[in-house]
Amino acid sequence: MSNLYSGKAEEIAETKYIDWPGRPGSAVLDNSIYRVHEYAFMEQEEYPELLKDFTGYMYIGQLNNLSNAQAMDACEKLLKIGKLQAEAQKDLDDLRRTLAGMGFPPMQTGVGLVPYDTLSNYFRGTIGTFEDLIEGPDLVEQAVDLFTDLQIANFQYFRYAQMPVKRVMFWMHKGMDGFMSPGQFETLYWKPFMKVVHALAEMDVTSIIYTEGKYDSRLEQMVDLPENKCVVHFENVNLQNAKNIVGKNSCITANFPVYLLEYGTEEQVIEEAKRQIDIGAPGGGFIFETNASIENVKRENLLVLYDTVRTYGKK
């Protein structure tokens, strides 16, 4: 998987919700990935406007509030941003062609988001949606339904586009244990998301579902994934339970803890890798994977992990 973005374009846009290495004044370390900062860009009383006219809410109302000079300045910035992003996209396409020539097809050809996470990440923020779950759950449900339908419509290109693979990556940001009740998770998080996943399966698209946080209490609700059409990554879960429940219908990827690669011994790395392979490998449908990014790990631990997976994993 390869993702490249133009930091300069983000500077011109004065992006608020992410910070990244190299940005003037950034606190993010040079060897780190970007950092997310959440904002509530929408107030609770704005739900009716969002639900009545999504396009108008997103664009027309914003432009009407700008003076002519402001609008022209915004358009000029958009042109600069578009040019820089196009340059970054060209570099990305070159990299993907290089990887393809080495025998590595793209991991994904599309990116999606759980409809509830769209609302929480980009409109109301985590705290705002927590308040809405109590004060206006019907508004949350309507917004989630809106984002579900919009996303399914946006994925229709899979019916016509020629691609080396058809896979969509979903990061599940707000569905972990404890973030909402089982009933709320079922109604507002999982079922709308399943509408998107099943719509993709009907187009012969594989969904790569990247759960974040602990997912032990969600496993029983994940059994309605379309059979043999999903890859499910777990960050923190009882792997045996995930294998027994989710692994019946879907490929699962392991949750090897990055902290062992950062702070553990080589012996601890080998022991945990073997344990996970013993659980996940029988019967197939298993991909060995770390539970998070590896930019700060000990090189010697990473090398011994690769060696263990390549040797022990063949037995």
Image (cartoon, grey):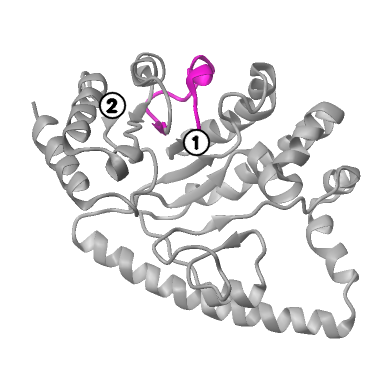
From the viewer's side, name the closer residue of 246 and 40: 40
Secondary structure of residue under mark 1: loop
Residue in the picture at 47% in, 34% down: 201
Is 225 colored magenta in this rendering?
A: yes
Q: Percent position (x, y) of residue 286?
A: 28, 29
Q: Percent position (x, y) of residue 260?
A: 30, 37
Q: How far apart are marks 1 and 2 (CA)?
A: 20 Å
| Residue type, mark 2 in image | Gly
Q: Percent position (x, y) of residue 13?
A: 66, 73
Q: Which residue is disc 2 drawn over?
A: 285
Eyeballing the image, is 292 above or below 106?
above
Residue in the picture at 60% in, 50% down: 154
Secondary structure of residue under mark 2: loop
Residue 83 - label: none
Local packing at callout 1 (Cα closer than 10 Å; few below 14, some 14-19, many 20+) is many
Q: Which residue is disc 1 drawn over?
A: 212
Decide: marks 1, 2 in contact (CB < 8 A)?
Answer: no
From the viewer's side, name the closer residue of 143 and 214: 214
- The image quadrant of residue 287 is top left
Side of 161 where 134 appears, left or right? right
| Residue type, mark 1 in image | Glu
Local packing at callout 2 (Cα closer than 10 Å; few below 14, some 14-19, many 20+) is some
Q: Percent position (x, y) of residue 43?
A: 85, 48
**Magenta region, residue range:** 213-234
From the viewer's side, name the closer residue of 205 and 98: 98
Side of 173 where 146 appears, left or right? right
Side of 13 where 198 appears, left or right? left
From the viewer's side, name the closer residue of 264 and 113: 264
Q: Which callout, 1 or 2, points to the residue nearer the camera?
A: 1
Mark 2 or mark 1, which is nearer the start of the sequence? 1
Q: How many numbered circles does the render carry?
A: 2
Is 102 colored magenta in this rendering?
A: no
